Amino acid sequence: MTTTPGNASSNLPGKPPVVDLATWQAARAELLVREKAHTREGDAIAAARRRLPMVELDGTVEVTGADGPVPFLDLFQGRDELVVYQHMWYDGAPHQGQCEGCTTTAWHVRDAVYLDARGVSFAILTTGPWDEVARYVEFMGYTQPWYSVRGVDAPVGGEMGHLACFLRDGDRVFLTYSTTGRGNERVNGSLGLLDMTPYGRGEAWEDNPEGWPVIGDVGEGHPAVGRQACWYWRTDADGNATWGPTSRPVPQWTRPGATPVETLGRHGHHH
């Protein structure tokens, strides 16, 4: 059994100042003005996003899932809208060699019942060969539909690491939106909650007071010089952030068969 990543320290160096409740309420109210402005600007951006033009694509292009090759149109499951996450893949890598960033995105969308209730289907696409992908999906215990888009052109295939939205009009299919990088954070509720906490994400790029802790370092392997974003998404069996043959994305440690003795294959390099 592994220990919990991110165990508490009783003596972190930086702490917020201690004040009485009235002083805290005044400071909280001042920040709330900015938060409300941020929310309204987010609403305005979402309104602009809904007004973007769209691009038609061939809905008959085949992707491969648990039932074999199917047309992309089938991923809508009869609904009008579809959101996909395009998951990076490292051919031939063992389970722990897959992408820690993509793993955290997929893990945060364990199912899509609330999207489905709103008329939106969800699927994960990846460029891996289906036999490898199927074993990985079983290992991780994922229930959302996965498909291999190997050899398929963008926007269904192509570069991975994106969230993309599609609209269906009968048998016609359109790309309406796509984002990558920090745009993918919308899926990851853990990051939003960390942003509410006094120590935030614990990453060196954050704007923090002098003396605030950067909770972890990654000092070995690729892609790492220390303290880059997402250091805590990949750990060894004891919860220490690291890349290499003894590490894997955090949720993989809870999977059946997730033993520390598995070693990283020669293809197991990471972005």
Image (spheres, rainbow, N blue to C red):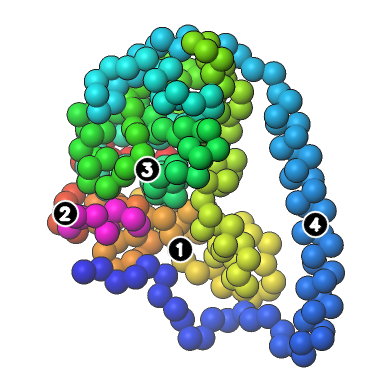
Which of the 4 image quadrants contains residue 255? bottom left
Does dot 1 land on a helix, a strand or a loop? loop
* Mark 1 or 4: the one toward you: 4
Residue sitting nearer the eye, 201 or 205 = 201
Q: How crowded is mark 1: few (under 14 residues within 10 Å), some or many (20 or more)?
A: some
| Residue ID for mark 2 | 257
Of pointers 1 and 2, the one earlier in the residue sequence = 1
The earlier-in-sequence mark between 1 and 4 is 4
Q: Residue at label 4?
A: 36
Task: Tell whether label 3 touches label 4 (CB within 8 Å).
Answer: no
Amino acid carrying mark 2 in the image: Gly
User: Which numbered disc, 3 or 1, marks the residue closer to the eye?
Assistant: 3
Foreground: 145 or 139? 145
On the image, the x and y values in percent for residue 73 come to 43, 17
Residue marked by disc 1: 217
Q: CA–CA distance between discs 2 and 3?
A: 18 Å
Q: Residue 2 has which mark?
A: none
* Dot 2: element: loop
Find disc 3 in the rendering and name its residue. Answer: 99
